[in-house]
Image (tube, helix red, strand yellow):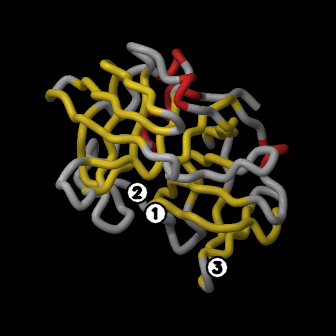
Amino acid sequence: MKIRLPLLSLVLFAGIAAAQPPPRVRGVIQAVEGQTVVVDTEGAVVRLTLTDMTGINGLEKRTMADIKDNTFVGATAVKNRDGRWEATEIHIFPESMRGAGEGHYAWDLPESTMTNGAATGVIAKGRGGSMTVHHAGGDVEIDITRRTEIVALTMGTRALLVPGATIMALAAPPQGGGNPSAIAIIAETNGVKPPM
């Protein structure tokens, strides 16, 4: 199966690209039955159909030291007590995915936003720091704390889709009463789970 990073990048992180973007599915794989991935989403079971177009990414742990000037990143953030954006997670895109979902928009986690763009003015302070994420619509200053999870997206295969693995998937609505199709999946890799 070919890995389609551009497809994954365009759909998984472009939260406002479509009028009604497909739902994100977060959970733990219960079983893989042929072309179907059975996912436990905290009590509800979702069955996702894999297709030849399903993009799959793995993950690797990273640190502040891996975020350089002009690194293309995505950051899920919430407002802190001082009214500043504070990253709950940062994911570093491979260069082939530069431009993925670029912008600053609402995310589907509580009171959060997603900002995708080029990191500038990166300041490391111990295990945290700050950066400005530059995107076509402007700049967003984001604080990074020791609690911020930092990961890198990697190319993945269906070998990552095993029972017990945590995933985040983008699912297209079912057609004709079938299961939703998995457009893109980010899968737990060597114990590193999708934080976004």
Q: Helix, strand, or loop for circle 3?
A: strand
| Tag 1 residue | 173
Q: Amino acid at mark 2?
A: Pro
**Place of residue 88 in the rendered image (x, y in percent of width and height, measured from the top left):** 44, 52
Dot 2: few (<14), some (14–19), or many (≥20) neighbours within 10 Å?
some
Q: Is residue 140 left or right of residue 191?
A: left
**Place of residue 165 in the rendered image (x, y in percent of width and height, measured from the top left):** 77, 59
Which circle's residue, 1 or 2, is located before the other in the chain?
Answer: 2
Which circle's residue, 1 or 3, is located before the other in the chain?
Answer: 3
Reply above or below: 102 against 26.
Answer: above
Q: Is residue 190 left or right of residue 17?
A: right
Which circle's residue, 3 or 2, is located before the other in the chain?
Answer: 2
Q: Nearer the viewer, mark 1 or mark 3?
A: 3
Q: Residue at x 60, y 80 (%)?
A: 42
Q: Amino acid at mark 3?
A: Val
Q: Residue furthest front?
A: 126
Q: Residue at x 60, y 75 (%)?
A: 41
- Asked whether residue 33 is in view, the answer is no
Q: Residue at x 31, y 19 (%)?
A: 121
Q: Which mark is residue 22?
A: 2
Q: CA distance from mark 1 to mark 3?
A: 15 Å
Q: Amino acid at mark 1?
A: Pro
Q: Helix, strand, or loop for circle 2?
A: loop
Q: Residue at x 52, y 27 (%)?
A: 93
| Tag 3 residue | 45
Dot 3: few (<14), some (14–19), or many (≥20) neighbours within 10 Å?
some
Q: Nearer the viewer, mark 1 or mark 2?
A: 2
